[in-house]
Image: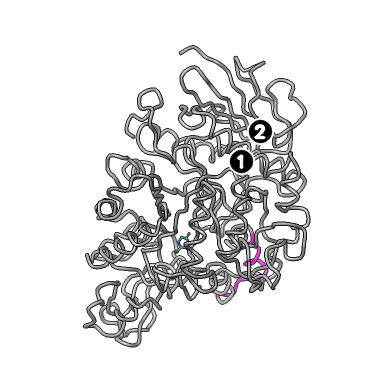
Amino acid sequence: MEGWDADVAPTTPWWADAVVYQIYPRSFADSDGDGIGDLAGIRSRLDHLRTLGVDVLWLSPVYPSPQDDAGYDIRDYQGIDPVFGTLEGFDELLADVHAHGMKLVMDLVVNHTSDEHAWFEESRASKDSPKRDWYWWRPAREGLEPGTPGAEPTNWGSFFSGSAWQLDDATGEYYLHLFSRKQPDLNWENPEVRQAVCAMMRWWLDRGVDGFRMDVINMISKDPALPDAHVVGSGGLFADGGAYYLCGPRIHEFLQEMSREVFTGRPELLTVGEMPGVTVDEARLFTDPARREVDMVFQFEHMGVDQGLTKWDHHPLKLTDLKATLARWQAGLADVGWNSLYWNNHDQPRVVSRFGDDGEHRVRSATMLATVLHLHRGTPYVYQGEELGMTNAPLRSVDELRDIESINHYRQEVAAGRDPEQVLASIRPMARDNARTPMQWDASPHAGFTTGTPWSEVNPNYTEVNAAAETADPDSVFHHYRRLIALRHSSRTVVLGDFTLLLHDDEQVYAFTRRLGNEELLVLGNFSGSDAEVELEGWEGSELVLGNYREPAEGLGLRPWEARVHRREVGR
Ligand code: NOJ
């Protein structure tokens, strides 16, 4: 794909004009009334996705799991958790997805397993276990008794609060877990680990799946010396060890090996690597097709624009920061590589509550945000419910938190003497729980998600915000997403056009052009509830391709949360 441009190379990868839809199975659709979504529930809702027009479904993990981290802690890579169904049920779903003309991508979680995985059980059994070296085991810090404060082998913190090390009584050594203590990190230095992972991936591909979304895949190569992290400021008990495990020394080698071992001879797949902390320069390497690593990455810079040192330190968005970062990624991956585009997933709060207005202007701001994102160059990802403009959860009390990350953080802060109400207030805007409330299908009890008791509270706004109401309303968020997806499918300029940011310093208006050959598109988005003036030469009287107001605009100015896409012909 190097130098990849419609004029030069008419064949582009199939995923370049595709739109991916992420399903979080626990919360999508429950077929058997146990309050948890399942595979049969997904099957029963494929028509919704077909109508929306998406090309690929990405399934968050459905493997057997103790569910400590909602399935991202896997006990068995080659099975289906009974709560979601069976392998036969999975095959039926896959066949149905294909029959609906869509593809299915699995979540690949191989930075860590569950501590209940047979590999880890064998590894922890003794220091001489043949699988001891499949995980990161270390003795206590020299001179300190195991289990005493500060005896952890490094000062690294876990993403879910506390130390990244857990003492295991069986052998008196610690194991590394960057996430929960029930998610021990695999040791990719060991070639047996890599071979086992590749064999498992081939097994899924042989079953017919169409690719993988690779969970925190840039964490698989660690600096084997495992040095202590640099402490920033006054520091907490534990520090950020990212320098020693984000895009570590052998990451490119490992991904190239995986690609050779697993993807050779299978050209029609989609691979996307989730990579916290990845830079544009690194992403160019990861996604350069000539290097055969991954097709695209999920980067996080634009998800950090409303945060301080930690995600709980939330502040309002400054639009110029968001524009600057996304434009840098557009430019950085313009000639080599490819971007993924997302506002939402199961780890992020709902974008209409985060960057939009989920009250009076919910529909208008959700459709504006969708327009701006989907008109960038890259492959857009839609997270379930985003196409309805679903909003953050009220999270009225700590009892409504279900996610290990927010619960651990709450406990840690309260134990440290902070005011519980203030801690909850800091968790509310950023909690992953916001994204995980049940899908809102209709106005019947529990939003039509389940006939039982849902595992997480349904957002009370389901009587108004739901798929049934929105499919019946041509002005809904749903139909706007449908139109955006159809536009991408029909316009090579949307897929391949060059990106140019305009109005860099404007704190209200997001504006850019996309150009291919002699067609140019202008995209305008008003990130505010007040009118905005826009002056751009040569666009007066241009054709309106898409907008989120029915009533025609006067001039280029934007009404509250308005988005418009204009088109004009230009000389070559
Ligand atoms: C990233 C996933 O998206 C998140 O949900 C999970 O908690 C961590 N990786 C650990 O697997």
Q: Nearer the viewer, residue 431 or 39?
A: 39
Rendered view: 344 above or below 515: below
Quadrant where the image shows the N terminus? top left
Task: Give the image quarter of residue 560.
Answer: top right
Three-letter amino acid code of the residue under disc 2: Ala
Q: Could you tell me residue 401's position as x and y percent? A: 62, 69
Instruction: Check disc 2: other Cα within 10 Å, few if <14, some if 14-19, many if 20+.
Output: many
Q: Could you tell me residue 42's position as x and y percent? A: 58, 60
Quadrant where the image shows the C terminus? top left
Q: Are marks 1 and 2 in contact (CB under 8 Å)?
A: yes
- Which residue does the image show at 49% across and 54% down from the upper left? 58
Instruction: Check disc 1: other Cα within 10 Å, few if <14, some if 14-19, many if 20+.
Output: many
* Magenta-drawn segment: 416-428
Give the spatial CA distance, label 1 vs label 2: 9 Å
Rendered view: 295 above or below 139: above
Q: Could you tell me residue 184's position as x and y percent? A: 37, 72
Q: Nearer the viewer, residue 14 or 206?
A: 206
Q: Could you tell me residue 189's position as x and y percent? A: 24, 64
Instruction: Mark 1 and ligand 1: say if the CB distance to the nearest ligand atom is below 8 Å.
Output: no
Left or right: 17, with 383 as reference point:
left
Query: Disc 2 designates what residue?
Result: 563
Q: Is residue 418 magenta?
A: yes
Q: Nearer the viewer, residue 201 or 522?
A: 201
Q: Earlier in the sequence, mark 1 or mark 2?
A: 1
Query: Disc 1 designates what residue?
Result: 370
